Image (cartoon, rainbow, N blue to C red):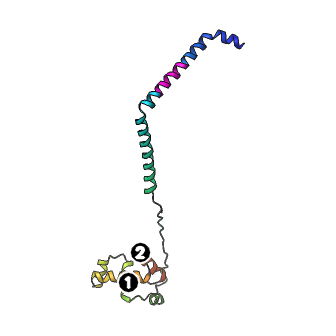
């Protein structure tokens, strides 16, 4: 049965084999032309693609922030029926003067150093000195931290 099929389609099979050999020869010639005639361009292009990919990957790794900042907002509830009482013990423990407490209260109101200086009738440098002493005594870095800590320990309402 297979022999009858081969005998009947002998011409078609021979023609198909010749076309297959011709396609193989043409592909081989094209490959030879591309690889051997343009080898420098191929290698240079491959190296360029590799280094471009490496540069993009490295840029993404270096510019990606390592620490993600999360903002947490705190709302403090104070009962208006309960009057504010200054925590004298905390004030003494910190060694804070009455003038520094005044400056801290004005900071809590959101006034700038210049505005605090105008209100207390002192120089800007005096307010800066008071601020740095407050930060040092309360062991904080910023005004917002000082105000938050002062509210927490009962120095300001």
Q: Distance from label 2 to label 1 (Cα)?
A: 15 Å
Q: Is residue 82 or residue 107 the one in the foreground?
A: 107
Left or right? Give the position of 111 relative to 92. Answer: left
Instruction: Decide whether residue 28 is among the magenta residues.
Output: yes
Left or right? Give the position of 20 relative to 44. Answer: right
The image shows residue 138, relative to residue 61, as above or below, that is below
Quadrant location, the C terminus? bottom left
Task: Report which quarter residue 99 is drawn in.
Answer: bottom left
* Label 2 SS: helix
Query: CB atoms at circles 2 and 1 under 8 Å apart?
Result: no
| Percent coordinates x, y for residue 78 in the rendering | 49, 78
Q: Earlier in the sequence, mark 2 or mark 1?
A: 1
| Percent coordinates x, y for residue 87 in the rendering | 47, 87
Q: Is residue 93 or residue 102 the one in the foreground?
A: 93
* Label 1 SS: helix
Instruction: Decide whether residue 27 is among the magenta residues.
Output: yes
**Residue, x 46% and y 50% (percent of image)?**
57
The image shows residue 88, relative to residue 11, as above or below, that is below
What is the number of callouts on the image? 2
**Residue, x 43% and y 42% (percent of image)?**
47
The residue beneath circle 1 is: 133
**Residue, x 45% and y 44% (percent of image)?**
50
| Percent coordinates x, y for residue 5 in the rendering | 68, 12
The image shows residue 66, relative to residue 15, as above or below, that is below
The residue beneath circle 2 is: 144
Q: Which class describes the residues within 10 Å of circle 1: few (<14), some (14-19), or many (20+)?
A: some
Q: Write the start and end of the magenta stretch as one range.
A: 21-31
| Percent coordinates x, y for residue 153 in the rendering | 48, 82
């Amino acid at each position: 049965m297979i022999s009858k099929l081969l005998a009947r389609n002998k011409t078609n099979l021979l023609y198909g084999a010749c076309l297959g050999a011709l396609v193989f020869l043409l592909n081989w010639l094209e490959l030879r032309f591309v690889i051997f005639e343009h080898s420098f361009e191929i290698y240079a292009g491959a190296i360029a693609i590799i280094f471009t990919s490496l540069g993009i990957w490295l840029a993404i790794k270096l510019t990606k922030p390592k620490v993600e900042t999360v903002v947490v907002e705190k709302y403090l509830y104070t009962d208006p029926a309960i009057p504010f009482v200054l925590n004298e013990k905390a004030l003494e423990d910190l060694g804070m003067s009455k003038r520094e407490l005044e400056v801290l209260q004005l900071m809590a109101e959101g006034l700038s150093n210049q505005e605090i200086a105008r209100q207390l009738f002192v120089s800007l440098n005096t307010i800066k000195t008071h601020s740095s002493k407050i930060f040092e005594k309360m062991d904080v870095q910023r005004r917002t931290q000082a105000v938050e800590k002062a509210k927490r320990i009962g120095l300001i309402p």
